[in-house]
Amino acid sequence: MENFTAIVNQVSSFLWGWPMIALLLGTHLYLTIILKFPQRKLFTAIKLSVTKDKEGSGDVSQFGALATALAATIGTGNIVGVATAVSLGGPGAVFWCWITGVLGIATKYSEGLLAIKYRVKTSDGTMLGGPMYALERGLKMKWLAIVFCIFTAVAAFGIGNTVQANSIALIVSETYSIPTYITGMFLSIATALVILFGVKGIAKVCETLVPFMAFFYIMGCLFILYINAPFLKETFALIIDSAFNAKAAGAGFLGTTVMMAARYGIARGLFSNESGLGSAPIVAAAAQTRNPVRQALVSSTGTFWDTVIVCALTGLVLVSTILAYPDIDHTQGAALTKAAFSKVPFGSIILTIGIITFAFSTILGWSYYGERAVEYLGGKRYVFSYRIAWIIAVFLGSVVNLGLIWSIADSMNALMAIPNLVALLLLSRVLIKESNKYLRPGHLNDIDTDEIPCLAAPVKRKK
């Protein structure tokens, strides 16, 4: 078992090494250029995200789809993940993490566009979409669509379920001395009450939970930055300087290099905002929207909120607190997070509530991703069984050690990205065509007249 664990860890490290970083970041940059910087439409996108599109077709509102995607995206990686990047790559990692968010907006925009362009509907009118349908309908690569769904279904139980449940159980146990099995029971019940109602139930909860948790955490971070105000000027200077000059990081970060800052900052940023992984477009396909570009713009704001805002604020809190309290041990990500937040008034409360809400929302969002992957692979008859397995996994994740599961989930996440990036790159002409069509002045409100294909109901064979 030790040898197997070591092999899995090596595979995970390789998959999230420079080749994957170059592939994802290169795709971000390529799409940014060929689509003429869709980031410039950010404020329009934010406005659209809170506007109901009554003339659009879909299962949930645009905001509901965005909230569900954000629920899955904003997780413990936004807190502990950023701390890991800082501890391994130095303060400069915060800058590179932020850059992935700025460039990743273009990729998330592209994923949302293809999700709507190639979505289908079932006989009861339910919308289905995501990279698997873009691969099948846009590129005629059903085999690669199947591969994507297999990786998604497996990854969901790791990064989207057990790992998140474990984070909640541990912090509740350490903070309030509540046994992990009790936390696991409550988590399982809460999860069941939401996911058994399908995407509409998940979206309704996320529409309330995501704004609350994001607002609470952002205000908490701003409060900590206010406390650390005397060190903010030095914090910004240190982050920028050490992103390009290892010596600027100072004696407290001996051993870090510019390459390490870039690698860990980019890797954690990519992992956090999930731009390019192919998860978010699965729920984007359910949105009520009148054309693909409107939902593409709404989807793009997810990366902005996740990385450009939340991850950046976490990084500023960590680096400013390190400067304010040089005695903090910043060699371990999780320890750095706990120590940094505990140094200021109410910091521990902000951290605890942040991790609990972020992790629980991720469990809800990823349940939908995994469910849709299973439905694509085997049909709707397996969905209920999948939900039951998901609820059981929440409890198990709360009470067991997840070292090996984390590494397997990391690997599956990376493997998910490859089929999705194939779709994005090979369908880039479609992205350009649709963007040119609807982003012209006065055309964003145009209604797409293309008919959404309806999946035929399975035919029952006579015995």
Image: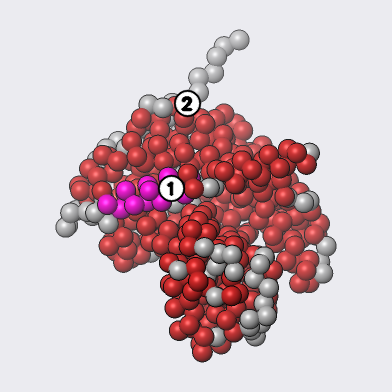
Q: Is residue 59 left or right of residue 370?
A: left
Q: How many numbered tags mark residues here?
A: 2
Mark 1 surroundings within 10 Å by alpha-carbon count, few (fewer than 14), some (14 through 19), many (20 or more): some
Q: Residue 15 placed where, x, y %?
A: 55, 43
Res 108 visible:
no
Please identify the residue farthest to the top as the structure is shown: 463
In the rendered view, tell whether residue 254 sits above or below residue 191.
below
Three-letter amino acid code at the position of disc 1: Ala
Please identify the residue farthest to the left as the structure is shown: 441
Prevailing secondary structure of the magenta residues? helix
Three-letter amino acid code at the position of disc 2: Trp
Q: Is residue 379 left or right of residue 23?
A: right
Query: Of helix, strand and loop, which one carries label 2?
Result: helix
Q: Which residue is mark 1?
A: 22
The residue drawn where x is 72% and y is 56% is: 166
Q: Residue 90 placed where, x, y %?
A: 55, 67
Q: Which residues are magenta?
A: 20-33
